[in-house]
Image: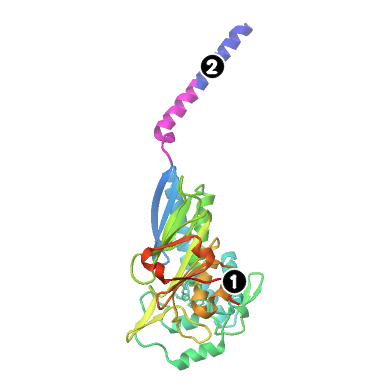
Amino acid sequence: MNGCENMLLCKSAKRVIWGWCLFVAILCLGGCGDRPSEHRSSLYVFGTLVEISAFTQEDSAFQAAVDELDREFQAMHREWHAWKGEGELVRLNRALARSEPFSVSQDMLDLLERGKRYTEQSEGLFNPAMGRLFGLWGFHQDELPEGAPPADSEIAEIVTAAPTMAELQIEGSIIRVDNPQVEIDLGAYAKGYALNRAVEHFRAAGFPHVIVNAGGDLCAAGRHGERPWRIGVRHPRGTGVIASLVLNGQECVLTSGNYERYLAHQGIRYSHILDPRTGYPVKQITSVTVIHRDGALADAAATALSVAGTAEWQRIARQMGVDQVMLVDETGQVLLTPAMQARIQIESEFRDKVVVKPLIQL
Ligand code: ADP
Ligand code: MG
């Protein structure tokens, strides 16, 4: 009897095992044989096309993660917009202008605290509290501004009032400010912050090999299979690339420049990056590219170094904790830190314009 029972048990166990083998075999026909490859998708947000590539096997799960990111990005765009709609930043600025306290979300708190830190490290050259000045120059609209620059007296009024992030009083989630000229504009680092979040989002969704590219500003993680991710850095004037580089794991590459947003008047191109000390657009620097693991910091530093100019950028870079920097100045000269030079391949036509500058200027 026992033997027979055992036989039956063996048979049914064997049947189960064979059943599983068949099931796995059918599944494998549908996908186990597929090797991971590059999958691409895109979405439109922050006024730009965001292209996402992942090195994976999971096409449909990847697309679902892209759709989820699209929803997150659209929400960030809505809540962090400096002048449009009724998002959190618009409501915060309205309260600050009336000297009223305002309770912010965790994300906004993080952005504001970072804004304070970057302002301090850059000695005020990075100043997201000067939204009023950016609006005065016509940069609070989707189209490129037209007409003459604002009157000197209007610019002077804001510069004299000296709104700065240092004036933000933060108590828990409550924000207060005594200077009603403070108006926050996250435009110089929100994109870098969002790109970081995108990479975190894909890693959490099971895609550790990803690159998220918003019009040349990007954050990446992992590798492209057997090889690392390789990217091109766009030339600040015209089309084409000025350099290319291989990415090492999680990294972001952020560029600030005056090639996309500017005010053109009587043959002069006024940059949308403004010097908080004078209230006028920066002139000397055409573009700054910064590589760092932290996208928000890289974005903020790229803006701050554009303001710092050829005389001060090395000191400000050191204070902000970035050491991989490329600057293109108005004469077309390409300034590199040694850490940037060690890893970037400048295109041959620009090689005679390269000057390597140590980060520490004595
Ligand atoms: P890009 O859009 O080319 O990446 P930035 O990251 O430098 O350029 O962001 C420029 C935007 O940042 C401007 O449109 C304005 O809203 C804001 N801004 C301009 N000057 C400053 C500054 N000195 N500090 C902080 N934000 C700035
Ligand atoms: Mg920036």
Q: Which residue extends farthest right?
A: 171
Q: Percent from the top left, x then y, of residue 55? A: 44, 47
For the question of whether residue 129 can be seen, the reply is no
Q: Residue furthest bottom?
A: 153
Q: Is residue 223 magenta?
A: no
* Disc number for residue 318: 1
Measured as percent of width and height from the top left, residue 200 is found at 53, 55
Q: Check disc 1 and report its element: helix, strand or loop.
A: helix
Residue type, numbered disc 1:
Arg
Does residue 20 show up magenta in the picture?
yes
Q: Main secondary structure of the magenta part?
A: helix
Residue at (55, 18) in percent of width and height: 13
How far, Cα to Cα, is label 2 from label 1? 71 Å
Between 204 and 2, which is closer to the camera in this rendering? Answer: 204
Determine whether 148 is above or below 69 in the image: below
Q: Magenta part of the protein: which range? A: 18-35
Residue appearing at x 66%, y 70% in the figure: 172
Q: Which mark is residue 144?
A: none
The amino acid type, in three-letter code, at marker 2 is Ser
Q: Which picture quadrant has residue 257? A: bottom left
Find out whether the residues at labels 2 and 1 contact each other: C-beta distance under 8 Å: no
- Residue hosting label 2: 12
The spot of residue 191 in percent (x, y) is 48, 66
